[in-house]
């Protein structure tokens, strides 16, 4: 079977029938041989082989598209989790076009350093940007969790922003210490005119701890590893956490 | 012994006999080319092994990333399956294969016992290579590029030696004709299976390259 298929046309086999001059006969014969060679080249074997390769390549392409799509979706989902409906908004944009989310630890020194720049930005872009703050207390800071709880307890009395400012402005007095600073935070609550009994109850409420944990797990899902971490419209901000650095990114987002 | 090594009139006679199926006719080329590639790969691996022995901090040229890394493969016990580095077998084996291929291309006619001997060697090679593939994928968890070159040529050599012997030495003749006819289909399926296994095993890594 295979022998028959693979045998090329023999130029001399039908030479007698076609007649003509010797040169023409040879030319015709070699044409025929070339045609036979071409025909033989596209054998079933070759066709199946290329068919297989085409299937494999198509499968790879399909897989590639699928992976790209699903990773886009995963990124989108993590981006959506960067800000939730109940996240604390310090300022809100009228058009809702640009949203900055900061994952912070009230005790972390670089968050304290970024704070003045953030405040300046918030004032300058009041009404133009939505500024969201989310908790990401790090375990190496002894009072980060307490501070986050204090801010959340203040939020239950609609004084989140005031507590946020108070905690950062006084970071040098309570930060970097091993002793429990809860009493200091109670003092801030009193200064802000909060109902202290309610403040204490909210601070110790398991729901407050759960909320901080939710902030943290959303941050982890979005790739937060250190504080402060900023996201502008769900996109991670990798520049310098300074007024100038953030301003440039916000301007770009507003323009875009 | 009846078989003598005699030279045919010319190289054309050995390679272009139209009554011989294409798959069996190309044996000389397969042996010469795959043998040469295999020799080069085995030689490179040996040189890298020597470099690694003289300088333990040496980074082999084929250690590209955590998965494609021959440094981590070469230092495993599997890389010296018989007590000495595997590529030494390759240098000897592929050298012989290359020589046979060139001799066939030159028109040499080799006796049956010679071809059956080559079949034996190629069968050992294919078994060894598949053991190495298994070890690389499922025990070591890394791929060594030069080793993969050896996998590819060893499979091709085994396949075409077998087909040649099916035709000329009447090995498994009942099913042989089909194999001869669909020679590249079988070879492609063989390679695709290995590629799929590699893709599946290191999926977690290939994924990170895509995103």
Image (spheres, coloured by chain):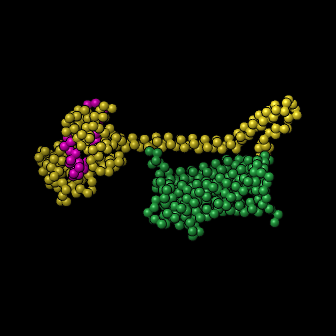
The answer to whether residue B47 of the structure is visible from this angle is yes
Q: Nearer the viewer, residue B58 or A249?
A: B58
Residue B160's x, y, as percent? Answer: 70, 53
Residue A237's x, y, as percent? Answer: 31, 42
Q: Nearer the viewer, residue A7 or A118?
A: A7
Quadrant holding the N terminus of chain A:
top right
Magenta stretch encompasses residue A100: yes
Residue B152's x, y, as percent? Answer: 61, 54
Quadrant holding the C terminus of chain A:
top left
Using residue A206 as the reference point, say whether residue A200 is left or right of it: left
Q: Residue at x 61, y 43 (%)?
A: A53
The total of numbered circles placed on residues is 0
Residue B94's x, y, as percent? Answer: 64, 59
Which of the chains is yellow? Answer: A
Q: Residue at x 50, y 40 (%)?
A: A65
Q: Residue at x 53, y 57 (%)?
A: B144
* The furthest residue to the bottom: B83
Residue B91 occupies quadrant: bottom right
Q: Nearer the viewer, residue A149 or B83?
A: B83
Magenta stretch encompasses residue B7: no
Residue B84 occupies quadrant: bottom right
The segment highlighted magenta reads A94-119
The answer to whether residue A207 of the structure is visible from this angle is no
Using residue A60 as the reference point, say whether residue A21 is left or right of it: right
Using residue A112 as the reference point, say whether residue A254 is left or right of it: right
Q: Residue at x 85, y 38 (%)?
A: A13
Tint of chain B: green
């Amino acid at each position: 079977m295979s022998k028959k298929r693979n045998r090329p046309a023999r130029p001399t086999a039908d030479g007698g029938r076609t007649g003509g001059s010797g040169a023409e006969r040879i030319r015709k014969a070699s044409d025929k041989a070339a045609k036979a060679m071409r025909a033989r080249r596209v054998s079933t074997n070759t066709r199946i082989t290329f068919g297989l390769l085409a299937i494999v390549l198509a499968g790879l392409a399909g897989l590639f598209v699928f992976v790209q799509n699903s990773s886009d979706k995963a990124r989108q989902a993590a981006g959506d989790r960067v800000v939730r409906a109940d996240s604390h908004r310090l300022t809100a944009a009228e058009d809702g076009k640009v949203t900055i989310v900061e994952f912070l630890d009230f005790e972390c020194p670089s968050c304290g350093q970024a704070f003045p720049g953030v405040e300046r930005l918030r004032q300058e872009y009041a009404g133009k940007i939505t500024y969201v703050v989310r908790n990401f207390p790090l375990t190496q800071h002894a009072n980060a969790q307490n501070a986050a709880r204090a801010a959340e307890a203040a939020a239950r009395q609609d004084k989140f922003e005031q507590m946020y400012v108070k905690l950062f402005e006084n970071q040098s007095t309570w930060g970097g210490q091993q002793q429990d600073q809860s009493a200091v935070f109670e003092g801030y609550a009193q200064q802000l005119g909060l109902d202290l009994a309610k403040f204490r109850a909210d601070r110790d409420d398991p729901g407050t701890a759960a909320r901080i944990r939710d902030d943290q797990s959303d941050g982890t899902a979005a790739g937060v590893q250190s504080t402060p971490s900023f996201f502008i419209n769900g996109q991670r901000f990798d520049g310098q956490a300074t007024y100038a650095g953030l301003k440039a990114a916000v301007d770009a987002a507003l323009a875009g | 012994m009846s078989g003598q090594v005699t030279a045919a009139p010319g190289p054309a006679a050995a390679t272009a006999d139209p009554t011989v199926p294409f798959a069996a006719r190309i044996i000389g080329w397969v042996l010469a080319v795959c043998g040469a590639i295999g020799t080069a790969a085995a030689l490179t691996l040996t040189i890298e092994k020597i470099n690694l022995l003289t300088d333990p901090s040496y980074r082999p040229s084929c250690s590209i990333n955590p998965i494609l890394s021959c440094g981590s493969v070469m230092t495993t016990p599997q890389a010296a399956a018989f007590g000495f580095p595997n590529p030494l077998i390759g240098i000897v084996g592929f050298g012989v294969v290359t020589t046979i291929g060139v001799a066939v291309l030159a028109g040499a006619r080799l006796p049956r016992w010679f071809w059956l001997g080559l079949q034996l060697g190629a069968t050992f090679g294919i078994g060894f290579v598949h053991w190495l593939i298994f070890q690389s994928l499922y025990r070591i968890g890394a791929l060594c590029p030069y080793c993969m070159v050896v996998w590819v040529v060893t499979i091709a050599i085994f396949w075409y030696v077998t087909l040649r012997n099916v035709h000329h030495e009447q090995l498994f003749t009942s099913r042989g004709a089909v194999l001869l006819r669909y020679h590249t289909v079988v070879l492609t399926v063989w390679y695709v299976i290995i590629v799929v296994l590699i893709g599946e095993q290191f999926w977690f890594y290939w994924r990170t390259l895509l995103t």
